Structure formats: C-alpha cells, structure tokens
Image (cartoon, rainbow, N blue to C red):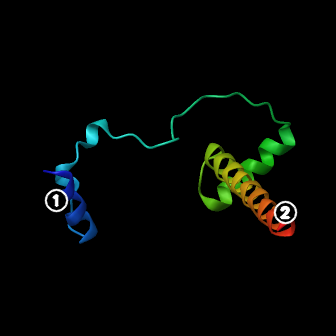
Amino acid sequence: MKAKTFDKQFDEGVDITAALELSKAKRVLQEQKRVNVDFPTWMIESLDREAGKLGITRQSIIKVWLAERLEESASNTTFQRTRRDAALR
C-alpha cells in the first residue's frame, strides 16, 4: 500500500492494522531499563498498602507516581518558561 493511500484510509478512520507489520513495532521512549532503589521499610509498607487499595502491584504504583511527578515537573517548567518569556516581551 502506498503511503498516500495509507494516510487517506487512516484519516478516514479505516482500520489499517492489517497493513502494519506489528511484530517490528516499537513504542517510542518505552525501552525498559532495570534500576535498583533502596527504600526504608516504612515506605515499602505504605507503598504496599496504597497499591493494595488500588489493586495494583508495588512496582506499578511506583511507576505511576513517578510518571505523574515527572509530568507535573515538566508542566511547571514549561509554565515558568512561558511566564518568563511573556515578561521579557
């Protein structure tokens, strides 16, 4: 299938998954890298309680909370740059 046809079908909402070779697909910036982090016992117990309330694993809650914090930090940085740039105008 030519790219133009592919794009047109995609834009029209046609299911184009049959035209994709999903076995070679990769998620951008999603490569996993293992790290070891030492936490105090009280923190592990708190993480386990919160994860249990949500029905997820300790690892999942750590990933979600870190991602939320990093996104918040990035948003604040962008907001601060925008305000600074506006003030300089």
Q: Position of residue 44 (x, y in %)?
A: 78, 42
Check the image and report above or below for 80 versus 58.
Answer: below
What is the distance, in whole Å, between disc 2 and disc 1 at their CAs? 44 Å
**Which quadrant of the figure has residue 43?**
top right
- Residue at which label 1 appears: 5
Q: Secondary structure at mark 1?
A: helix
Earlier sequence position, callout 2 versus callout 1: 1
Front one among 86 and 16: 86
Q: How many marks?
A: 2
Residue drawn where x is 25% and y is 64% of the image: 10
Instruction: Say what amino acid the circle numbered 1 marks.
Output: Thr
Tell whether 55 sits left or right of 1: right
Tell whether 42 sits left or right of 21: right
Q: Residues within 10 Å of mark 2 (few under 14, many from 20)?
A: few
Instruction: Say what amino acid the circle numbered 2 marks.
Output: Arg
Q: Position of residue 22 (x, y in %)?
A: 27, 43
Residue drawn where x is 84% and y is 38% of the image: 41
Query: Extreme bottom residue here?
Result: 12
- Residue at which label 2 appears: 84
Q: Position of residue 80 (x, y in %)?
A: 82, 62
Q: Are marks 2 and 1 in contact (CB under 8 Å)?
A: no
Tell whether 5 sits left or right of 34: left
Q: Residues within 10 Å of mark 1 (few under 14, many from 20)?
A: few
Check the image and report above or below for 62 versus 50.
Answer: above
Check the image and report above or below for 70 versus 12.
Answer: above
